[in-house]
């Protein structure tokens, strides 16, 4: 991001943006805030991505969404949604409206799972970070033991390529 801010032919910058700084590989969230402000000063639009950190912040969805929506200098955000309840929740929070109780109940009871995406580099950082022994290294990528996995997200925070999501 630091490099492309000065490129005259770039009008919009896609920036990784979430409360935990997940996916920012060569800097910190504080540095990202500074770069977002600089981008605005240079007339660039900023499109915030990964506000839910690949699902790792699902348990703090309102706070994660508010973080992206209220970040100074961010013009819009991208949020992943998989069902009607997530669409209603995100729309209500973004609009400052109350989230219907039945939507909150459906989201609270939704079965979630850990998903390792095909671009996993099999570095093993997730396996090392799992406090519950729910991940073991397979031939090409980690394998999840769903009986042991509590969806804490430590593995996703440890993954340098954001190849782990909670869906």
Image (spheres, helix red, strand yellow):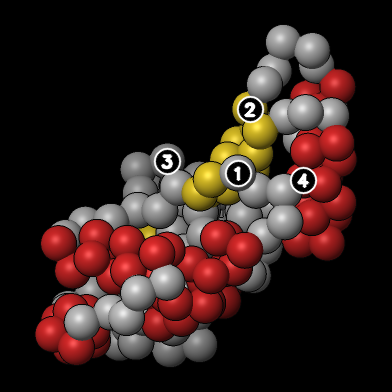
**Pointer 1 residue:** 75
Badge 3 or badge 4: first in the primary sequence: 4
Secondary element under disc 4, as helix, strand or loop, is helix
What's the distance in space between the residues labelled 3 and 4, CA to CA?
Answer: 28 Å
Query: Can you tell which mark lies on residue 12?
Result: 2
**Pointer 3 residue:** 119
The picture places residue 41, in percent across and down from the top left corner, at 85, 36
Q: Answer above or below: position of 78 versus 127.
A: above
- Mark 1 touching mark 2, by CB under 8 A? yes
Mark nearest the camera among 3 and 1 is 1
Residue at position x 78%, y 38% in the image: 40
**Pointer 4 residue:** 36
**Image quadrant occupied by the C terminus:** bottom left
Badge 2 or badge 4: first in the primary sequence: 2
Badge 3 or badge 1: first in the primary sequence: 1
Badge 1 or badge 2: first in the primary sequence: 2
Mark nearest the camera among 1 and 4 is 1
Secondary element under disc 1, as helix, strand or loop, is loop
């Amino acid at each position: 991001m630091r490099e492309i801010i000065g490129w005259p032919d770039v009008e919009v910058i896609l920036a990784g943006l979430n409360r935990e700084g997940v996916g920012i590989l060569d800097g910190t969230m504080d540095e990202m805030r500074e770069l977002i402000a600089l981008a605005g000063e240079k007339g660039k639009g900023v499109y915030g991505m990964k506000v839910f950190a690949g699902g790792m912040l699902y348990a703090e969805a309102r706070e994660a969404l508010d973080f992206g929506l209220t970040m100074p200098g961010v013009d819009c955000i991208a949020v992943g949604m998989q069902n009607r309840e997530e669409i209603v929740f995100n729309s209500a929070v973004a609009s400052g409206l109350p989230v219907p109780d039945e939507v909150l109940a459906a989201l609270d009871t939704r079965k979630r799972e850990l998903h390792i995406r095909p671009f996993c580099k099999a570095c093993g950082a997730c396996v090392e970070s799992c406090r519950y022994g729910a991940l073991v290294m397979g031939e090409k990528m980690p394998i999840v033991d769903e009986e042991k996995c509590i969806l804490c997200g430590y593995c996703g925070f440890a993954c340098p390529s954001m190849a782990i999501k909670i869906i």
